[in-house]
Amino acid sequence: MSGAAGRRLWFGTDGVRGIVGESLTPELVERLGRAATVWSGRGRVLVGRDTRGSGPALEEALTRGIVAAGGTAALAGILPTPAVALLAQDLGLVVSASHNPPEYNGLKVFDREGHKLTDADELEIEALMDATGAGGGSVEPVEHAAAGYVEHVVEHFGSDLSDLRVAVDCANGAFSAIAPGVFERLGAAVTPLACAPDGTNINVGCGATDLSLLRSTVRMGAFDLGVAFDGDGDRMLAVDANGETIDGDQILAICALELEPELVVVTAMTNLGFHRLMEEHGIRVVTTDVGDRYVLEALRREGGVLGGEQSGHLIVLDGHVTGDGLAAALTLCRALGGRPLADAAAIMPRFAQATANVRVASTSVPPRVAEEVARLTVELDGRGRALVRPSGTEPVIRVLAELEDAEEARTLCGSIADLVRAEAGTS
């Protein structure tokens, strides 16, 4: 296992995130921008944002912080998170709350190599929150950033898609003006969905966090598959021709069997069936804490090129620096090799997973809960497992029970969630 939450005050599992006007304010974003720029050496900072209504005001606050620190704010406007990572200069900053609802916003930080920061890096930035900036910075518009990103992705991940009929759900987010056109350019017959952002509809009833629109569209039409991104474009899920969900574990399995890497990196949430399939094919699996940045850290440490999360983060480092929903979708389409998606996904056995999110006042896992999970691990003896972990983005303790029998998994999950409520209390 690798990765840890550390002792950070503002940074969570994936950057800084909160409800705008409450836990996330323009003043905080300005301080973060100043601190991150000082930390990076006061160079050129590429700034992108997703389509939330709060984005322009927070971009302005972030720009003030960059300029106050003596940096150059290179403003690229609406741009998917993976594009900012690819094009990052001395620093890359994204004003985004990723898959969260519209009332949230946040900040993601990439270093000059397009890598997400380590816990230690984030602690260093937090220590600079009250640092005095050198001043004298500047602001420059960046033209054609999206076009440059598209050329890179098409070159490294594109293939002939002329036989595919694809529904593309962009979550009314940063891929709305990009992803459908990429699929069309590669020859696919495309039906765009949720591509009309208005500042209030990002991730609302659409996208990778709510597949209902994509499922219903595919079921009513003649499609080979559907793909859905989240609001900032760093994750992707799919549905097959019958509208059935294909999760990140299944997508990763399909790509792993096609790419045949020596190892693949996953998180603690990854289905046990994935582990069984990789073992059968002689592919080593490295497991990290939940969070795509921990997957990225492990890939770099282990020299791997493929990893991902059940939630839809798929990372292919052969031609990229981070997780990218569009690159993932194109990799999946190429890996199908003309097969129906349902047939390709069926090769991975799936253990039943039951989950519960318990809202709590404190996200520390109570000792009695940890002891019970340890006892259950011994009792299950490899035929299943239980997992309890604090959320990195909200006041929730997440519970997972995984067994081959679905009813047994639900019962076990319920009993552990009840114990969490009893021991931790609810918020």
Image: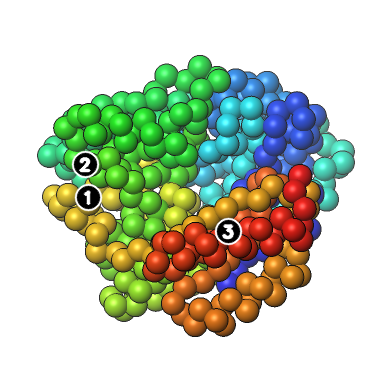
**Which-is-in-front pick, marks 2 and 3?**
3
As shown in the figure, which amino acid type bears the numbered disc 1?
Leu
Please, what is the three-letter code of the amino acid marked with disc 2? Answer: Ala
Residue 37 visible (yes or no): yes
> Which numbered mark, 3 or 1, is in the foreground of this view?
3
Alpha-carbon neighbours of circle 2 within 10 Å: few (<14), some, or many (≥20)? many
Q: Residue at x 25, y 34 (%)?
A: 218
Mark 2–mark 3 Cα distance, whole angstroms, equals: 33 Å
SS assignment at label 2: loop
Residue carrying label 3:
414
Count of numbered circles on the image: 3
Spatial separation of the CA atoms under disc 3 and disc 1: 33 Å
Q: Residue 41: in sight, yes or no? A: no
Residue at disc 3, secondary structure: helix
Picture disc at residue 241: 2
- Look at the numbered discs 1 and 2 and tell me whether their residues touch, using CB distance below 8 Å: yes
Mark 3–mark 1 CB contact (< 8 Å): no
Say what secondary structure mark 1 lies in.
helix
Residue placed at 17% from the left, 42% from the top? Answer: 160
Q: Which residue is painted at 54% across and 65% down in the image? A: 412
Query: Which mark identifies residue 95?
Result: none
Task: Give how far across and how far down residue 150 sits, in percent.
Answer: 36, 35
Q: Which quadrant does the N terminus fall into?
A: bottom right
Whichever of labels 2 and 3 marks the residue nearer the N terminus, that label is: 2
As shown in the figure, which amino acid type bears the numbered disc 3? Gly
- The x, y position of residue 170, in whole percent, is 40, 31
Residue under numbered circle 1: 341
